[in-house]
Image: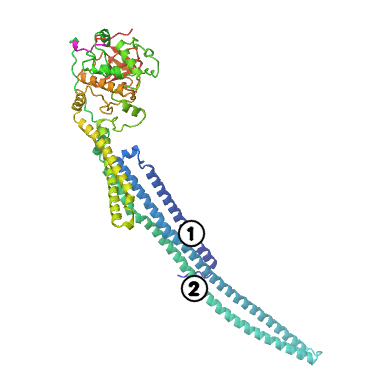
Amino acid sequence: MSWGTELWDQFDNLEKHTQWGIDMLEKYIKFVKERTEIELSYAKQLRNLSKKYQPRKNSKEEEEYRYTACKAFLSTLNEMNDYAGQHEVISENMTSQITVDLMRYVQELKQERKSNFHDGRKAQQHIETCWKQLESSKRRFERDCKEADRAQQYFEKMDADINVTKADVEKARQQAQLRHQMAEDSKAEYSSTLQRFNQEQWEYYHTHVPNIFQKIQEMEERRIVRIGESMKTYAEADRQVIPIIGKCLDGIVKAAESIDQKNDSQLVIEAYKSGFEPPGDIEFEDYTQPMKRTVSDNSLSSAKEGKPELKFGGKSRGKLWPFIKKNKLMSLLTSPHQPPPPPPASASPSAVPNGPQSPKQQKEPLSHRFNEFMTSKPKIHCFRSLKRGLSLKLGATPEDFSNLPPEQRRKKLQQKVDDLNKEIQKETDQRDAITKMKDVYLKNPQMGDPASLDHKLAEVTQNIEKLRLETQKFEAWLAEVEGRLPARSEQSRRQSGMYDGQTQQPVTNCAQDRESSPDGSYTEEQSQESELKVLATDFDDEFDDEEPLPAIGTCKALYTFEGQNEGTISVVEGEMLSVIEEDKGDGWTRIRRNEDEEGYVPTSYVEVYLDKNAKGAKTYI
């Protein structure tokens, strides 16, 4: 099967077909190029997707990735990043092994095709020239033969005419012979040209054309083979990355299998465990013994005369308030000293159908006295939270993390100690390196001046000393917290008893044993701060074992209230709570939840049901 023998007369069609083959190859190159662009775009989108969901540094998201599920998701993102890299490899391989190679081959193919068809056209032009020569020789021979025939007929006519002279006859005879000779020469030339043309034609159709068409056929077959090999390379480019993509998918499966729900549950405990112990059993309150009942503020005001006068900073440790419990007295000191917020829907509970109105009584003398005292120092809401209250109000976190529950505080302190130890180790390594360099300079003065390192060495040593002092401070706080965690009651008793032998010593440390106070602040008058702290300590010692206030009724929350100030408590709409102290005219009612949470809520936010049999309860009109 040869195009030279089978398609000897299809020169133009072969030219069109080979041009179509080159166009087909260029189309395949364009297809592969677009595929590589898609792979690059897909890889870029995958990388952007992986980057989008990566945890941000120094953010809350980074802390969440300690859970196994989040770690598995992070591993999935990393594997997807590697997965995207394999698509980039596919694009690179297709570009280098297919696109670039085929583009170079197309240029070579075009040159070869051009050369082959140029030879074909040249041979075609040569055979056409030979044919023209044959036709010219043939026409000349035909013309000479006709001229010779006419000259012969003229001679015969002249020879037969008796009126013609002998010279004219001889002239006609010579002309006839001349024409016959020219005809013979034309015949010989035509014969020679014909033989030569036949030879050229035979060579053209049996040698030149087959050879040229054979080259064109081989060129076309190479093109077909090359495009087939490129398709195989196209498939191999994908197949080569399949094992790595499989490993990426295996990594995702392995990450999914590494998820441990029990471990995540334990991490939740470690993250949010407060370290507080659950409340103990509530003691039975025997109302049959009136002497054990807490005397109301009215009784206290009626019996105020004859009682020892309260003096801040006094040295006596006598019971200054024998009939007031610790939580009762501290509630007077820590109750909110600002008007309660209006309810969301109405200005007063009277807007609620069948809702009783809270009574508006005049403040009692004792309560009025303490409220005046607290109003004069509006920022001192708790004697134990002066400095930390200011820090919280300014939005800063206390250095000792005392605003956190014990367990969370211990974790923060431990982390801080570990970070400081790392810094110390880093500075120590730097000091050792400087010391070694100094020794080298001492042994080889030409390498440098040892005295030039003294300043740097002293600076590093000073930094190490500062870091060690800082570490000791945080370790002391950590030891304090770790000592409190197992037995908080014993620690509190030790702290309360610490002042038994120090009644004459002023208190200067306000950071120890502080409670959370969002609105807390401190005063610049150190003497007043010390007196208030001693007073608070005296109250702690005298009334540690007092019973909680009894409930004088119940109440229902009409609206949701977020207690954010010191002494307030948050309630949810519809919640039932116990009333332990009614509204004294300042718009606040003291309530209790579950016998362990007490605080004030706006009277207009609750509907109060007082127990008429309870001592000190009053009936609303």
| The stretch drawn in magenta includes residue 51 | no
Q: What amino acid is at disc 2?
A: Asn
Of 4 and 59, the residue lying toward us: 59
Of the 4 image quadrants, the one containing the C terminus is top left
Which label belongs to residue 211? 2
Pointer 1 or 2: first along the chain:
1
Q: Is residue 277 above or below residue 84?
A: above
Residue at the extreme right: 163
Q: Nearer the viewer, mark 1 or mark 2?
A: 1
x then y, percent, for residue 18: 50, 64
**Secondary structure predominantly adopted by residues drawn in magenta:** loop
Confirm whether residue 583 shows in the render.
Answer: no
Confirm whether residue 311 shows in the render.
Answer: yes
Q: What amino acid is at disc 1?
A: Glu
x then y, percent, for residue 307: 24, 10
How far apart marks 1 and 2 lie (CA) works out to 27 Å
Q: Residue at x 39, y 59 (%)?
A: 233
Count the numbered circles shown.
Answer: 2
Which label belongs to residue 49? none
Of 21 and 498, the residue lying toward us: 498
Q: Is residue 52 above or below residue 181?
A: above
Q: Is residue 249 above or below residue 375?
A: below
Start-end of magenta stretch? 291-296
x then y, percent, for residue 515: 28, 26
Q: Residue at x 32, y 13 (%)?
A: 369
Identify residue for label 1: 26
